[in-house]
Image (cartoon, rainbow, N blue to C red):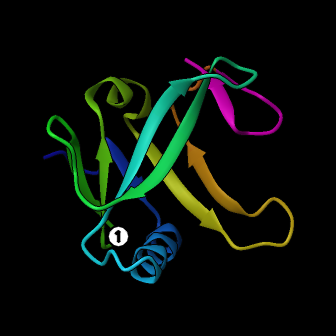
Amino acid sequence: MGDERLIRLTESAGRKVGGLLQRQGRPQGVLRVAVVGGGCSGLQYKMDLQDAPQNRDIVVDSSGVRIVVDPKSALYVTGSELDYVDALTEGGFKVKNPNAATSCSCGESFSA
């Protein structure tokens, strides 16, 4: 188990993820947040809705949602906040990561 010092959801993101889990018929599901190689800055976020945590996952309860992070990704997301912006342009999920040294103009990748 982890806590919101690892990663946290804003209320807006919590409502959106909770609604998506309900719509998919996974009321007890989790939001997986991972960091993988790729993107124009070297690293990018990968988010996925899943039924349950995996064996070595760190589980964080935030804004009514269980977030799971693998130990390797935890090194990159510690202290991050996941927000959801409901807007016609530049809307969607946004990650505020204090560990990101640089990020690309599209906002989808970063370097640490």
The residue sitting at 56% across, 60% down in the picture is 83
Asked if residue 63 is positioned above or below residue 72 in the image, the reply reads below
Q: Is residue 53 left or right of residue 43?
A: left
Asked if residue 74 is positioned above or below residue 65 in the image, the reply reads above
Instruction: Depth check: give the residue in front, 24 or 77.
Output: 24
Q: Position of residue 7 (x, y in %)?
A: 37, 46
The residue sitting at 48% across, 75% down in the picture is 20
- Magenta stretch, residue numbers: 102-112
- Quarter location, residue 108: top right
Q: Position of residue 75 (x, y in %)?
A: 35, 24
Crowdedness near tag 1: few (<14), some (14–19) or many (≥20) residues, C-alpha within 10 Å: some
Q: Is residue 110 left or right of residue 79?
A: right
- Quarter location, residue 31: bottom left
Q: Secondary structure at mark 1?
A: loop
Q: Quadrant of the C terminus?
A: top right
Question: Within the magenta stretch, is there residue 110?
Answer: yes
Question: Within the magenta stretch, is there residue 7?
Answer: no
Q: Position of residue 29 (x, y in %)?
A: 29, 66
The residue sitting at 33% across, 23% down in the picture is 72
Q: Position of residue 19 (x, y in %)?
A: 47, 80
The residue sitting at 42% across, 44% down in the picture is 33
Q: As shown in the figure, which amino acid type bears the numbered disc 1?
A: Ser
Would you name the residue on which mark 1 appears?
63
Instruction: Depth check: give the residue in front, 61 or 69.
Output: 69
